[in-house]
Amino acid sequence: MTEEKYIFQAATKKKLVIVGIVGILLFVAGIVLFPGAEHHGEEHALISVENTDLVASSDETPAATEGHDAHAEEAHHGSSTLVKNIYSNLWVNNVYFAGLAIIGLFFIAIQYAAQAGWSAGIKRVPLAMATWLPIAGVLMLVSWFVVGHDVFHWTHLDLFKEGSDTFDKIINAKKGMWYWPLTDNPSAIPVFFIGRMVLFFGVWYLFFVWIKKQMLAEDLNGGVVHWKKARTLSAVFLVFFGYSSSIAAWDWVMSIDTHWFSTMFGWYVFASWWVTGLSVIALIVVMLKEAGYMKIVNSNHIHDLGKFIFGFSIFWTYIWFSQFMLIYYANIPEETVYFIERLSSSNYVWIFFLNLILNFLLPFLLLMTRDAKRHMSMIKVVTPIIIVGHWFDFYLMVTPGVMQNKGGFGLMEIGMFLIFAVVFLFVTLSNLAKVPLIAKNHPMLEESLDHHI
């Protein structure tokens, strides 16, 4: 049982290649069929906040829309609508799949820090997911220089030049978040912003390498020395992750809607990443179990994964509702504009409500009973729903801020998601096949074998 090793078979690779080709074809078809791609590249419609119940009163509207109107002035800077849509999708998938990699490492660190024994037999799956980290870092860094001006409005330097027609006092007041040292005329490259991105991915990857080294050394040497070192590293990593993941959420997602901010946003992005990562781990474990691997895994381990998914789906909903409710109740125009942008356009309003159905209602109903959490067939139903649902969640975080009311969902979005998913799975499964599937000398392996709930 403990000598298991996953074989990444040619048939599995072939299926992934076929899905990847389908994704490429759908992406190309989406470009070809993109509505009006050749016409309205330079136009952005302003959102009217006067006609919504979320705005407190008409006399507050100018204050609310002053910054947002400036946001819409990006038209004279930007690329065509089609190119912006491609860039927006690229950034959505970058952030989404980078989250799956970091959650792989986070899951391992949580297990070590909590001295958990039940998960001893499944930790190689999240470890394999974390191998996407360096690829995610390179992709995000390189693509930022490609998509920057079209996705991040604040990168236009004339917004910081007092006296210019496009000077924005709100964005100018935030320039310390991206540009350092502070000057009246920031440089073309936001050194502070880029520096944080490099630092975060660099430190995350270092902890991944260090923890992985201890995990593999444990296979060879046994004992508890390597387990204790991995636990220490995990504890330090978790402290760094707590800060870095929130700042990353502000940088990579919240700054797209430059005038808007939420003090809960770091938690919100983490919750979405976390429950998605749990779903991917559970789905891979179940698929491996059905393929004849993971003999150590039984219905009790599946139950634990199901409880995690169920509980953190509710946690995500709690964060979502708290953020929405506080903004709705306070009814401050510069805050409500974020939700107005997503509720006043027919391109997004259906995704707004679908988000709640896929990420809360269905997981809550389907995983409510004890038996549902213990059956692999139910896990195979629920986890794809959550994986797709939280992709829509990130889509809704990013696209309206980039495209305003010109965004949409179609073949292009499906195609790019499939391309990223195939490459991510190929990297994950390839690395899963390089090491033993079970940590045979894990000091709590016997506890995992006897695990019963």
Image (cartoon, rainbow, N blue to C red):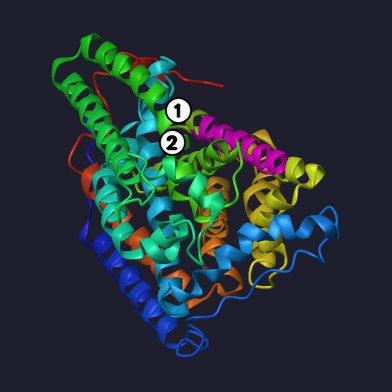
- Name the residue located 33 percent from the left edge and 57 percent from the top edge: 144
Residue 247, position in %: x, y?
45, 37
For badge 2, the amino acid type reads Ser
* Residue at image mark 2: 245
> Can you say whether 85 is above or below 149 in the image?
below
Q: Is residue 186 visible?
A: yes
For badge 1, the amino acid type reads Gly
In this view, the residue in front, 411 or 72, is 72
- Name the residue located 43 percent from the left edge and 80 percent from the top edge: 80
Residue 250, position in %: x, y?
48, 43
Determine whether label 1 and label 2 are within 8 Å by CB: yes
Main secondary structure along the magenta-highlighted residues:
helix
Magenta stretch, residue numbers: 302-323
C-alpha span from label 1 to label 2: 6 Å
| Label 2 SS | helix
Please rate how many residues cluster around mark 2, counting C-alpha atoms within 10 Å: few if below 14, some from 14 to 19, many from 20: some
| Label 1 SS | helix
Residue furthest to the front in view is: 163
Residue 39, position in %: x, y?
49, 90
In reply to whether residue 341 is colored magenta, the answer given is: no
In this view, the residue in front, 69 or 289, is 69
> Can you say whether 380 is above or below 48 in the image?
above
Please rate how many residues cluster around mark 1, counting C-alpha atoms within 10 Å: few if below 14, some from 14 to 19, many from 20: few
Q: How many marks?
A: 2
* Residue at image mark 1: 242
Residue 414, position in %: x, y?
46, 70
* Quadrant in which the C terminus is drawn: top right
- Name the residue located 44 percent from the left edge and 57 percent from the top edge: 161
- Name the residue located 69 percent from the left edge and 65 percent from the top edge: 349
